[in-house]
Image (spheres, rainbow, N blue to C red):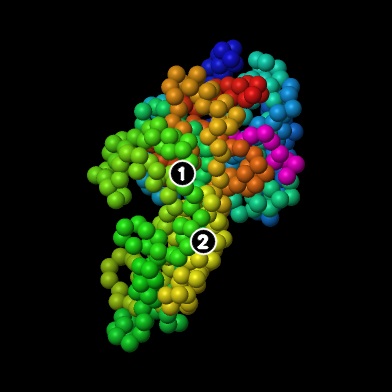
């Protein structure tokens, strides 16, 4: 593979320019900005590497699909997305969020880590391998959606209609990061999610707060309802919530012990003294990866502007996400939440379902996982940090486990990439190494 690696080094400015070009398109799905341009740009890259590319329509933004035939019957797919989070708050960026500025070895841009850096690294790896070896060692598919940042709301529709396009022996998933110590993370799954908004309504209009003596305040009522859902010890009190959580396997316990999690560096970055519940070591890692959560994302009610306004609000809303682990079902969790609120006398509180995604996991002992782990160690000269499952969520089930396809996540980000935040960035050297890694994985996996 040294000849391929040398080609990548010799042509890295071309690949960096590809990345800069796609990052300069503000493809914000939530605001329908730049989506058509981004999809067409991805399609042009697939054309650049000789792929059979097309835009596959959905009820929302299209999926960019491409296939490049190789010399074996084995097929490796790449799942990515071309949409990004909004860039707000813009005033906290040190560089324009859609310029792709390179400073001190880092490229800064919205979406450069999540997920355009990984997407371009994979396309570049195919290109470099073709230039040196002429043909790929296996078939490659690109599945690049445009709605990941808004919950992949039409990806299930795509996968139901086009199982032939999805069919593969293995899938490299969208994300990946380096730890503070420089080790590459390799992740074998994602948590699921039940994302809901709870709405509590009172009077038909905001009122003078003098009426609080005789008119119920929906904000208080919503807070009282929330207090029944989770306690101060972080235990979710919804009946049946933990019933389907699986016990850790012996392999998973070993993986937790071997997992390197940079506790001091993370606390320092966040300017915190300790983690939740004072956890550290294996207990911290086990909770991060294998425990379901109940998190308040935001609460709104009444007057929150500058200065004072004595108001009794007519409505209160809270957005909550439940991160789920195998074998929890997001639809069941939503039903349990409804039953819980009803049982405690909150039948009037409306539940709006905003995102339901199943958890997904690939066994630790799997040919694709072994290929990625081996190739990573050979390239970086360090054993990677193997995450049995990411604490984050994505639509992995819809593209992979739903069809029995194993999936592994590895990519070009780092623990300070600031995904979804101002000054999102990647190290340019990590991007180049990411191209090399995917090229090595293609060759290695083709032989397994």
> Is residue 168 inside the magenta stretch?
yes
- Counting from the top left corner in percent of width and height, residue 131 is at 66, 17
Which of the 4 image quarters holds residue 68?
top right
Which of the 4 image quarters holds residue 232?
bottom left
228 lies above or below 272: below
Which of the 4 image quarters holds residue 31?
bottom right
154 relative to 93 in the view: left or right:
right
198 lies above or below 24: below
Q: Residue furthest left?
A: 273
- Counting from the top left corner in percent of width and height, residue 447 is at 65, 21
Query: Can residue 40 be seen from the camera position used here?
Result: no
9 lies above or below 272: above
- Counting from the top left corner in percent of width and height, residue 256 is at 41, 37
Observer-nearest residue: 266 or 324? Answer: 324
Query: Can residue 375 be seen from the camera position used here?
Result: yes
Range of residues picked out in magenta: 163-172
SS of the residue at dot 1?
A: loop
Name the residue rendered at 75%, 33% in the picture: 52
For marks 2 and 1, the one nearer the N-term is: 1
Please give the label number shown on residue 115.
none
- Counting from the top left corner in percent of width and height, residue 200 is at 44, 74
- Of discs 2 and 1, which sits in the foreground? 1
SS of the residue at dot 2?
A: helix
Label 2: which residue?
A: 333
* Placement of the C terminus among the 4 image quadrants: top right
Please give the label number shown on residue 248.
1
Question: How many angstroms separate mark 2 from mark 1 (CA)?
Answer: 21 Å
> Is residue 111 inside the magenta stretch?
no
343 lies above or below 305: below
Name the residue rendered at 40%, 60% in the picture: 236
287 relative to 366 in the view: left or right:
left
């Amino acid at each position: 593979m040294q000849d391929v690696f040398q080609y990548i080094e010799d042509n890295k400015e071309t690949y960096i320019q590809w990345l800069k070009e796609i990052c300069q398109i503000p493809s914000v799905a939530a605001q329908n900005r730049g989506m058509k341009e981004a999809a067409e740009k991805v399609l042009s890259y697939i054309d650049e590497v000789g792929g059979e590319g097309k835009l596959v329509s959905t009820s929302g933004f299209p999926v960019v699909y491409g296939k490049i035939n190789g010399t074996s019957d084995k097929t490796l797919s790449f799942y990515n997305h071309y949409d990004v989070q909004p860039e707000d708050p813009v005033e906290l960026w040190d560089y324009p969020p859609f310029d792709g500025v390179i400073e001190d070895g880092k490229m800064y841009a919205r979406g450069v880590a999540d997920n355009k850096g990984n997407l371009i690294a994979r396309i570049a790896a195919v290109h470099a391998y073709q230039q040196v070896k002429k043909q790929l060692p296996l078939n490659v598919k690109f599945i690049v959606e445009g709605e990941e940042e808004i919950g992949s709301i039409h990806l299930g529709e795509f996968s139901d209609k086009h199982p032939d396009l999805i069919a593969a022996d293995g899938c490299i998933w969208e994300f990946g990061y380096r730890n503070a110590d420089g080790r590459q993370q390799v992740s074998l799954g994602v948590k699921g999610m039940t994302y809901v908004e709870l709405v509590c309504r009172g009077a038909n209009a905001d009122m003078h707060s003098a009426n609080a003596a005789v008119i119920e305040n929906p904000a208080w009522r919503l807070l009282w309802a929330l207090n029944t859902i989770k306690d101060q010890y972080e235990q979710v009190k919804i009946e049946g919530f933990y019933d389907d959580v699986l016990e850790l396997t012996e392999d998973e316990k070993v993986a937790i012990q071997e997992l390197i999690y940079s506790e001091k560096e993370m606390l320092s970055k966040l300017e915190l003294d300790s983690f939740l519940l004072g956890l550290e070591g294996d207990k911290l890692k086990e909770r991060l990866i294998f425990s379901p959560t109940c998190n308040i994302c935001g609460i709104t009610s009444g007057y929150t502007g500058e200065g004072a306004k004595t108001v009794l609000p007519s409505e209160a809303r809270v957005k909550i996400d439940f991160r789920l682990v195998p074998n929890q079902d997001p639809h069941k969790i939503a039903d349990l939440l409804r039953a819980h609120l009803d049982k405690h006398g909150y039948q009037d509180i409306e539940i709006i379902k905003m995102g339901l995604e199943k958890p997904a996991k690939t066994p630790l002992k799997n040919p694709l996982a072994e290929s990625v782990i081996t190739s990573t160690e050979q390239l970086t000269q360090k054993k990677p940090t193997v995450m049995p499952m990411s604490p984050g969520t994505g639509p992995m089930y819809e593209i992979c486990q739903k069809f029995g396809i194993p999936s592994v996540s590895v990519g070009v980000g780092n623990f300070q990439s600031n995904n979804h935040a101002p000054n999102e960035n990647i190290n340019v050297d990590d991007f180049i190494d990411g191209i090399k890694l995917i090229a090595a994985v293609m060759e290695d996996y083709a032989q397994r």
